[in-house]
Image (spheres, grey):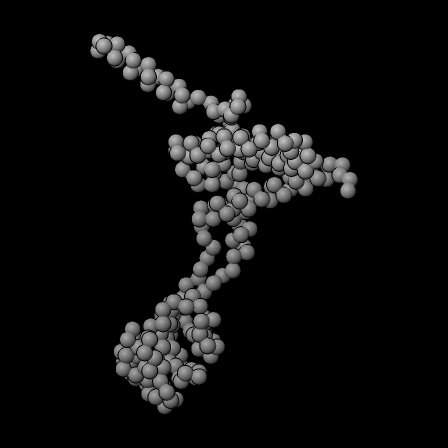
Amino acid sequence: MTTRFKHSLIAATLLLAGSAAMATPSVNGVTISQQRIDAIARMMEAQGQPANPQMKEMITDQLITAEILRQEAVKKGMDKSADFQAEMENAQAMALANRFIKEHVRTNPITDAQIKAEYDKVKAEFPEKKSYRARHILVKTASEAQAVLSALKKGKPFDQLAKEKSIDPGSKVNGGDLGWNEPATFVAPFSEAMIKLAKGQVTATPVKTQFGFHIIKLDDVKVEAAPPVDALRPQLEQRIQSQRIEALIKDLKAKAKVQQ
């Protein structure tokens, strides 16, 4: 066998193999179209499945299996039953309805102005939430609390006094720092006193709770505002689309002659 003939034979073999790989599958002469394979592939991709040759091979195998079973069902006359006809009508109606909605969404893109208008509505509904960063010195008696207040008035640092005097083991090592919290985190007498303070201010009198007596210092306050528009864009688009589709369906229902 000459080298040239060998190369030609290899090329022909590769060409035939490529043609076989690209051939449209069929079962007993019934062709499974590439459009059917592609339709399922697009659906799986939309659900996050990776598009690769293995996925296409799996889809083709499933469709071949389905076609074999379909043909057996037809032989038994199952395609003539009233139940099957009803299922097919329902499947067709739902498929066309979904296609109509998708086309409506595609041909009516949402504008930045509409996003901004919807964001303004959401922002107005967004509840203002305040968080407080406070420190405290917890002692057992009122006289001990008064002694702490006297030391503070004389200029002793709050965090130092907390480390020396506080009986709260969780915060004393941090100078009484309780971190960021919403008022509801604390018992009522504590939170009520805390939210009345200005930044840097200390309670003028001890605050009594079931834990003892507190001297409270407010370090800072922050107000949680609505997230920026770009952070909410996906939710805003979904909200607008839902409103549009609902309005479209309502309008079409109003125009349709429906009898029940």
The answer to whether one can see residue 20 in this image is: yes
Q: Nearer the viewer, residue 63 or 186?
A: 63
Tag count? 0
Question: Can you name the residue that lies furthest to the bottom here?
Answer: 143
Whether 23 is drawn above or below 99: the answer is above
Task: Please state the horizontal and vertical placement of residue 17, each as a whole percent of the image.
Answer: 36, 20
Task: Please state the horizontal and vertical placement of residue 99, each as a whole percent of the image.
Answer: 58, 33
Q: Nearer the viewer, residue 206 or 177?
A: 177
Whether 213 is drawn above or below 186: the answer is below
Q: Nearer the viewer, residue 147 or 8?
A: 8
Q: Nearer the viewer, residue 103 or 7?
A: 7
The answer to whether one can see residue 149 in this image is: no
Task: Please state the horizontal and vertical placement of residue 9, each as a whole percent of the image.
Answer: 29, 13
Residue 94: quadrant of the picture: top right
Residue at 40% x, 85% y is 212
* 198 relative position to 72: left or right: left
Residue at 40% x, 21% y is 20
Residue at 51% x, 53% y is 123
Question: Can you name the residue that lies furthest to the right here?
Answer: 259
Of the 4 image quadrants, the one containing the C terminus is: top right
Task: Please state the horizontal and vertical placement of residue 44, each as a whole percent of the image.
Answer: 47, 37
* 211 relative position to 118: left or right: left
Whether 109 is drawn above or below 172: the answer is above
Whether 184 is drawn above or below 51: the answer is below
* 97 relative position to 234: left or right: right
Of the 4 image quadrants, the one containing the N terminus is: top left
